[in-house]
Amino acid sequence: MAEKPGDPADRLDVALLSLGRDPGCLAVLLRLLLPAEALLDLARQARRRPGPPDPALDLAHALTSSSGLRRRAAEEVARHLPPEEVWPPESLVQEESLPHLAPRSLHGAAARRLLAERPTPEELRPLLEAWLAARPEPPPEPEAPAPPPPRRSAARESRRARKRHEEEEAALRRQVQEGRREISRLEGELSRAREEKRLLEEERSRLQDSLGQAERRAADLKQQLQASKAPSRREEKLQGRLEALERTLHVLQEKFRMIEEERDDLREVLADRERFDEAPEEEIPSFRDRPLLAEEQELAQRLAARRESGRPPLRILVIGGGEPQYRHRERFEEYASILGFQGEWRLADYSSWHQAMDALARDMRERFDALVILHWNRTTFTRNARRICNEAGQKPCITCHYEGFTSLRQTLQECLRQLLAREGPATAAG
């Protein structure tokens, strides 16, 4: 049985009332749970039954009819319960294992079941029998509060029992009368509360009516004030047309500014492209047949040391150029392989560059460490590309003024120096 939350004395009060159906079982339980002095003190407050003195049995009979005495007994039992640390688990408290438990464990098991919800005598009887059998000696009976009275006759005992029943019946009648008086008092309070509620409802309805009238008067006054300040219908139409024309003018000015910017930008791109398309074809010898420059050798050594430390190679994306320049792509890839970085060269889309911005943003986030833009790309494209590099982590974005492959070669060297410098002094030093 799981322990229920709440005050132990409250749960023990309910348990003693439930066990009062079997006074004999309850008397045994009281003898085991309470010290002799406490049991005797509680029994003095109970009515003594005919026959040999038995304080535990007298108290067990009295607990079912006296709530005050039962509450005091519950508090006394709660005070003498063992701590929860010595309560045995419920799985061990089985009928076949009860004879093997120590008295202290049986005491804890009894405490657990008493604190459960409404224990029954049938549940506690095997536990009490095992508890009594486990005690080395039966607990001493408390001394009777008075010497045993002389034996009475059957008629006298019958009269005493009838008198006791009459007293109990009178007590119950008094309780019923008190309950009826309490019900009458509560009904009066309920009637008064209902009357107060009715009056409050009437007052609330009256205040709502007053509020509605005030709101309607305020709305009328507001309309009159607006009508006194409002312009004529013709002025309203002219004001509306003026606002619409101002919005249209603003939109047209923005469109004109964008078209002018695109026109000037496109003119510059077409002029540059035409000039570079007419440039003589440049022959670039293989980098494998000739040594690198001193500054290139230094960069190659730093990139090699970087690879040996287990770091991935640096990745550079080049965008732009016409067909004559794009023919140098193989030399670009050869130069990247010899110097020790990864590179990719793409032609620019001069007419629909904006459609490639999402792909460029994704590539700069995931694939490349730096961007090189050949200078005849459109100004708007360059501006957006720089923004993408900044959003991807302030990655280098360098514009190359292409006057031949040598200018691209120098721009790549500057780009690599910036990337190495970003990684810290230790990497930059090799």
Image (spheres, helix red, strand yellow):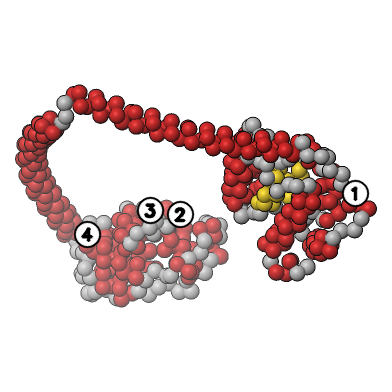
Please indicate, yes or no, whether residue 357 appears anywhere in the rendered image. no
Position of 356 relative to 294 (above/below) = above
Q: Tag 1 or tag 2, which sits nearer the N-term?
A: 2
Q: Residue at x 31, y 60 (%)?
A: 10
How many angstroms separate mark 4 from mark 3 (CA)?
21 Å
Q: Are marks 2 and 1 in contact (CB under 8 Å)?
A: no
- Name the image quarter holding the N terminus: bottom left
Residue 427's quadrant in the figure?
bottom right
Q: Which residue is mark 3?
A: 117
- In space, the residues marked 4 and 2 are separated at their CA atoms by 28 Å
224 sits to left or right of 280: left
- Answer yes or no: do the residues labelled 2 and 3 have beta carbons within 8 Å? yes
Please tell me the numbered disc located at residue 66.
4
**x, y (%) of residue 5?**
38, 58
Judge the density around disc 2: few (<14), some (14-19), many (≥20) Cα neighbours within 10 Å.
few
Asked whether the residues under the numbered discs 4 and 2 touch, taking CB atoms below 8 Å apart as contact, a structural biologist would say no
Residue type, mark 3 in image? Glu
Vertical relation: 322 (above or below) 408: above
Q: Amino acid at mark 2?
A: Met
* Secondary element at tag 3: loop
Query: Which of the two discs, 3 and 1, labels the residue nearer the N terminus?
Result: 3
